[in-house]
């Protein structure tokens, strides 16, 4: 049996505490009124006052009116910043746990023989779906209560003057939005609880009925997930840029979910193996995980390029504005994701021997996780804070908080059951797996 060490527990709690303190400061430091933002703008403009001493009064009045509008827009952006900084890691790490469970269900549905010795690792990571799902839902509810302006379609004043959003209100309305979110999160968690419960029963003795039950549950979950995942990506991410849409977006987010999920399985497995656990996990298991890491990275890059080239080629104004804002304000991050999520993982893991070396797989995994966090950042931040972005205390604090909660939840769950299923149908095949 695995036992979570006191050092790891203390480390996770310290991350949570530091993250919470930083986030509290970030919310307090955010502007509380438009007047405060106007003062900030006036202070910056005073530095250049001498250059405008001879400007005519009519021009000055026009500039004052423009500045008032800009101040209100900037006020909403700066107020959104700590909320968006928290939303990015909350949804990103929650979807990692969902991706791990999807991979777990794929192994069960495909009757895979190589992976059963990793099932308990997958189940432990999937346990974060409960606190992670609660965090996501709480943030969505708080957004619906107008405590932030991350989802502009939730603002009645904006909708009243926006014909495009008005045409989408049948789908984008707060009650239906929250109902769908509850369906997604509740459905995913319910499937995970039922399957993990059956897995625990397999420790008591071999029962083929439990194996068949998980096979059927896995097949049902995958059908449910492929529909709800697309809708989730539209709701939680794409609707932030309400005027924009992409028919590839659900697949694009799915690729990110899968690659980060498999990467997290590999990193947790290597960590536990290094601590002397998972005696039946060998280099071939790590090799297969690394193959999926590289394969899903290429799949993600294919979808990134497909979505971009279709929008670039069509050159439809309401579509290109999505990339125009990112080219203008986030060029380094936008193209940096291609380096981190495709070029480097492919170059590092394309060598078969490298896929069997733990520190190389760990290095590639860290690059992938950082790259996909930035990918989610680029998907969410332009529509919430615009060009008023920078990596600062809110982003770092939110990431520390959620990572701390993730570590505590996952490794505490791993200590609740043996790290290897005792009576799996393909357990012996997995124990002696060699590639």
Image (tube, rainbow, N blue to C red):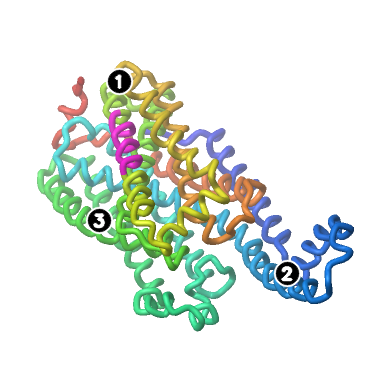
Could you say which quadrant of the image residue 111 lies in?
A: top left
Could you say which quadrant of the image residue 52 lies in?
A: bottom right
Q: Residue at x 88, y 65 (%)?
A: 54
| Helix, strand or loop under label 1 | helix
How far across and down, in percent of the image, does residue 282 sit? Answer: 29, 21
What residue does disc 1 label? 283
- The span shown in magenta is 291-302
Q: Residue at x 50, y 83 (%)?
A: 160
Q: In terms of depth relative to the viewer, which is nearer, 309 or 414?
A: 309
| Helix, strand or loop under label 3 | helix
> Decide: marks 1, 2 in contact (CB < 8 A)?
no
Image disc number at residue 226:
3
Q: Residue at x 17, y 40 (%)?
A: 205
Counting the numbered discs, the total is: 3
* Quarter that holds the C terminus: top left
Q: Left or right? Give the position of 373 relative to 171.
A: right
What residue does disc 2 label? 67
Q: Residues within 10 Å of mark 3 (few under 14, many from 20)?
A: some
């Amino acid at each position: 049996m695995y036992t979570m060490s006191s050092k790891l527990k203390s480390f996770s709690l310290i991350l949570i505490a530091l993250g919470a303190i930083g986030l509290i400061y970030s919310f307090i430091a955010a502007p509380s009124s438009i007047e405060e933002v106007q003062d900030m703008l006036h202070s910056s403009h005073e530095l250049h006052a001498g250059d405008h001493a001879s400007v005519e009064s009519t021009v000055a009045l026009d500039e004052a009116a423009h500045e008032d509008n800009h101040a209100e827009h900037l006020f909403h952006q700066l107020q959104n910043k700590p909320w968006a900084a928290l939303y990015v890691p909350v949804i990103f790490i929650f979807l990692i746990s969902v991706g791990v469970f999807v991979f777990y269900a794929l192994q069960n549905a495909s009757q895979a023989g190589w992976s059963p010795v990793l099932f308990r690792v997958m189940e432990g990571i999937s346990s974060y779906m409960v606190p992670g799902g609660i965090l996501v839902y709480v943030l969505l509810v708080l957004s619906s209560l107008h405590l932030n302006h991350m989802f502009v379609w939730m603002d009645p004043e904006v909708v009243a003057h926006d014909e495009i959003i008005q045409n989408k209100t049948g789908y984008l309305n707060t009650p239906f939005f929250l109902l769908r979110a509850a369906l997604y999160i509740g459905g995913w968690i319910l499937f995970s609880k039922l399957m993990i419960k059956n897995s625990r029963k397999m420790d008591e003795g071999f029962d083929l009925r439990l194996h068949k039950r998980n096979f059927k549950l896995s097949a049902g979950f995958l059908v449910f997930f492929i529909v709800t995942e697309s809708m989730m990506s539209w709701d939680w991410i794409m609707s932030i840029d309400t005027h924009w849409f992409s028919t590839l977006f659900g697949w694009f987010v799915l690729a990110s979910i899968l690659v980060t999920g498999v990467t997290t399985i590999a990193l947790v497995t290597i960590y536990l193996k290094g601590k002397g656990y998972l005696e039946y996990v060998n280099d071939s298991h790590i090799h297969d995980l690394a193959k999926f890491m590289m394969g899903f990275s290429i799949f993600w890059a294919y979808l990134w390029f497909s979505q971009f080239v279709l929008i670039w080629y069509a050159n439809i104004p309401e579509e290109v504005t999505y990339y125009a804002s990112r080219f203008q304000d986030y060029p380094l991050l936008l193209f940096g994701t291609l380096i981190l999520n495709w070029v480097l993982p492919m170059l590092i893991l394309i060598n078969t021997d490298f896929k069997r070396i733990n520190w190389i797989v760990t290095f590639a995994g860290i690059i992938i996780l950082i790259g996909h966090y930035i990918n989610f950042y680029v998907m969410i931040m332009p529509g919430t804070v615009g060009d008023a972005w920078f990596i600062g205390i809110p982003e770092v604090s939110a990431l520390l908080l959620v990572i701390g909660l993730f570590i505590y939840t996952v490794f505490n769950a791993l200590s609740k059951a043996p790290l290897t299923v005792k009576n799996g149908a393909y357990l012996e095949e997995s124990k002696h797996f060699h590639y």
